[in-house]
Image (cartoon, rainbow, N blue to C red):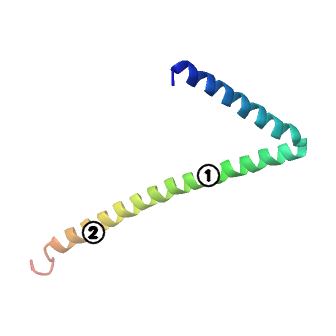
Amino acid sequence: MSLQAKADSLAANASYLTNGSLAVFGALTLNQLIGLAGLGLGLLTLLFNVWMQRRRDRREQEFHERRMQVKLETEQFVTRLPDSDSTN
């Protein structure tokens, strides 16, 4: 199949897709279109909230791991300190 034939086929398919989608949206009332827009906005909000929550969870996990590491290092340092009673 030549490049010209592929381009013609793509143009015809794009035309049918555009006309079909316009026919579907043309058959909808204004209230239905507003409802679809609201549904789309709700889905986008949900996806954004999930994304932000995953980022927050990752930050909190990193903070917790660092805090536990500092706690462990502090405990190890304290156990290595000489006993103050043994020097007297």
Residue at x 56% of width, y 25% of height: 6
Task: State the image quarter where residue 53 is shown.
Answer: bottom right
Expressed as whole percent of the image width and height from the top left, the position of residue 25 reads 82, 39
Task: State the image quarter where residue 16 is shown.
Answer: top right
**Residue wearing tag 2:** 72
Task: Check disc 1 and give the amino acid type.
Answer: Leu
Nearest-to-viewer mark from 2 and 1: 1
Task: Check disc 2 and give the amino acid type.
Answer: Leu
Residue at x 45% of width, y 57% of height: 58
Q: Quarter holding the C terminus?
A: bottom left
Expressed as whole percent of the image width and height from the top left, the position of residue 42 reads 72, 51
Vertically, is 44 above or below 8?
below
Q: Nearer the viewer, residue 29 or 23?
A: 23
Is residue 60 toward the left or the right of residue 79 in the image?
right
Vertically, is 84 above or below 19?
below
Q: Nearer the viewer, residue 24 or 40?
A: 24
- Mark 1 element type: helix
Residue at x 58% of width, y 55% of height: 50
Is residue 15 toward the left or the right of residue 47 in the image?
right
**Residue wearing tag 1:** 47
